[in-house]
Image (cartoon, rainbow, N blue to C red):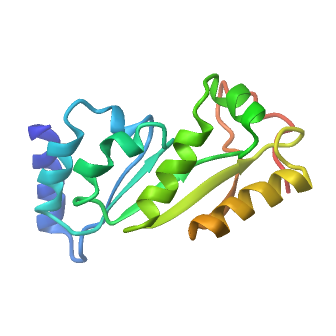
Amino acid sequence: DTERYKIIKTMSDRSPTPLKIKLTGGEPLLHPTITSLLSDLSTLTPSIGITTNGVLLSRHWPSVSRYVSSVNVSLDTVNPEKFNLLTRRKGLNRVMDAVKLASESHRVKVNCVVMRGFNDGVEDFEGILKFCEEAGVECRFIEWMPFSGNNFDGKFVS
C-alpha cells in the first residue's frame, strides 16, 4: 500500500487539476487493508469512488463510507434466479440492501450490463429500473465489454 500511495501522491502533486481516484477492477472491498488504503488516499483528494459487486458493501460500509464520495454497484439483474446463475452465488438481497444503505448518505449508481438472451427482456429492464427508482439511485445500462475469454460473440445488445 505504501508504494501505491507514493505513486498516487506523485501523480497528485504533478496534476494540474484536482485528483479523482476510482478503485475498480476485481473487488476493491476484498483488499485486506481497504480502510487504511482509503484513509491514506483521502489525504490526497476528497473525490474517491469505488466500483463493487455490492456483496461485501454493507459489511465494510461503516468503515469505508467516510472516505468515499461515490459508489458504483455492478448489478445486472434483480431476478434472484438470474442473479444466482450469473454470480454463481446467492446474495441478491444483500446487494440490494447495500445499495439502499449506501444511498442514504452517498451518490450511488447501479451499472447494469445488458446481455442478449439473458437480461434483455422488458421484465428485466422494468425490474432494475423499479429497484433503482425506489432506492433513489441512478441506473446506467452499459454494454458488454469485449475481451478475450468472455465469450463476447453475439451478446452485444444495440
The image quarter in which residue 155 lies: top right
Where's residue 44, x and y in %?
A: 14, 63
The answer to whether residue 103 is left or right of residue 89 is left
Where's residue 64, x and y in %?
A: 26, 51
The answer to whether residue 107 is left or right of residue 139 is left
Which residue: 22% across, 69% down? 46
Which residue: 21% across, 76% down? 16
29 vs 133, nearest the viewer: 133
Query: Which quadrant is home to the C terminus?
Result: bottom right
Which residue: 57% across, 49% down? 96
Q: Residue furthest bottom?
A: 17
50 vs 127, nearest the viewer: 127
Which residue: 64% across, 22% down? 88
106 vs 37, nearest the viewer: 106
Where's residue 19, x and y in %?
A: 25, 68
Please determine whether, in this image, residue 31 is positioned above or below residue 49: above
The image quarter in which residue 56 lies: top left
